[in-house]
Amino acid sequence: MISKLEPYKQYKTSDVQWLLRIPDHWQFKRIKLLFREIDQRAGPEGGVLLSLTRRRGLLPHHEASKRIASVEELSNYRVCRPGHLVMNRMQAWSGMFAVSSYDGVVSPDYSVFEANAPLEARFFESLFRTPTLVTQFALRSKGIGSGFNRLYTDAFCDVPVPVPPLPEQTAIVRFLDHADRRIRRYVHAKQKLIALLEEQKQAIIHQAVIGQVDVRTGQPYPAYKPSGVEWLGDVPTHWDVTRAKYLLREIDVRSITGEETHLSMSQVLGLVPSNMVERTLTSDSYVGGKLCEEGDLVLNRLKAHLGVFAIARQDGVVSPDYSVFRNRDFTVMGYYEKVCQLPTLRRELRLRVKGIVEGFWRLYTEDFFDIRLPVPTFIEQCAIAKCITEAILNIDDVISRVRSEIDLLQEYHVRLIADAVTGKVDVREEKVCCES
């Protein structure tokens, strides 16, 4: 991807604890010698509102949010110009810096800096977002908790940073732009591969669960009949169609101790222990949560219209806002898990949810139970569930490997930037070609 990078030939030591050595011809300077804060307010004329985002940097607010700010609101906002360095003071500890490409205004809780002397501001934008500098900014931020910590200008400007000569700053930025394009292109190609594999997986599932293909022969069934259900279409003539209430029964048993394993819903992993799900909501107590057993079908009532159904792979306790279903006679839960996850069923689910706005919609049991579902024979349900599991196992393995490759690429990208801007590798002689 990127040719093997070598360190500089000569280094010198420093008394800066967090970066003990830098290339021999680099300097250490405090930020106050490089940048000065400017505090020009928009006034009654306002300006184009800009927002600082973690992934895309500083961009017009309408591209990041649907909220429209009035001119009156903007009068006290800070003016920034192309080339100015913008810092979100409340998020500096997480690397929220960007160089502006726009004339506009930013939040009064941001800080705006301009260079004291000729320098490549984008070099310092990358430097200030490295884990090493972010740690220094976090140590110097003040506040009650991490979400309310602010990095004030005097503390920010007191931080010593490595400074290469200006031509070298420019060369490093040029190399990082080149590397960024290449890595993004690799990641995009892998994301497209994942999308294609997901489509292939969904096609296999869809054809099997609605009877377009008999999984036992790999061929369509001999004859079909109208199901009378819009989202389902025609089904094999020997299949039945019935309401969910005749196939499933709701279980509402509550935890008394709250000591059971807490399970959370993940659209990738299914229903798993909550410590396996990133950014999941947790609670100090799960007393009153709903108990489920291995093999139960669980739905997140707030996200049912998105197909968020999954089978419990172990006993545990789930949120009281989930619904837990157990099978009736001759109902194979592995089959109905896939039916309930079908994209074609989501329109039906969306019509039956209740609530004022999305995010607060709920699918209540009586509305779910009224939905008509396909009913193959018990033997066919077993065969379909088994076939789908086997058919998508290899696809899921490939998807998992590709996601791991994306994670490694992104980790490499972060490390490459940090190594370049702190002088661990010499990129001056790297050939950089123009790429679209």
Image (tube, helix red, strand yellow):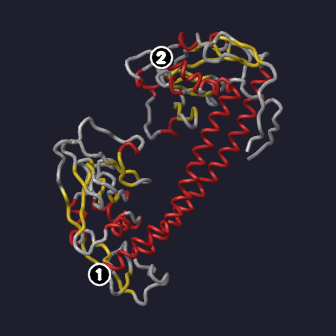
Callout 1: SS: strand
Residue 119 image offset from top left, x and y in percent = 72, 19
Residue 362 image offset from top left, x and y in percent = 27, 53
Q: Amino acid at mark 2?
A: Ser
Label 2 – label 1 distance at C-alpha: 65 Å
* Residue at 78% in and 16% down: 24
Cβ atoms under marks 2 and 1 closer than 8 Å: no
Disc 1: CA contacts within 10 A as few (<14), some (14-19) or many (>=20): some
* Residue at 43% in and 75% down: 208
Residue 273 image offset from top left, x and y in percent = 35, 47
Q: Residue furthest bottom?
A: 222
Q: Nearer the viewer, residue 96 or 417?
A: 417
Image position of 403 with respect to 131: above or below: below
Residue 422 image offset from top left, x and y in percent = 68, 23
Q: Amino acid at mark 1?
A: Asp
- Checking the image for residue 141, the label placed there is 2
Residue 173, by quadrant, is: top right
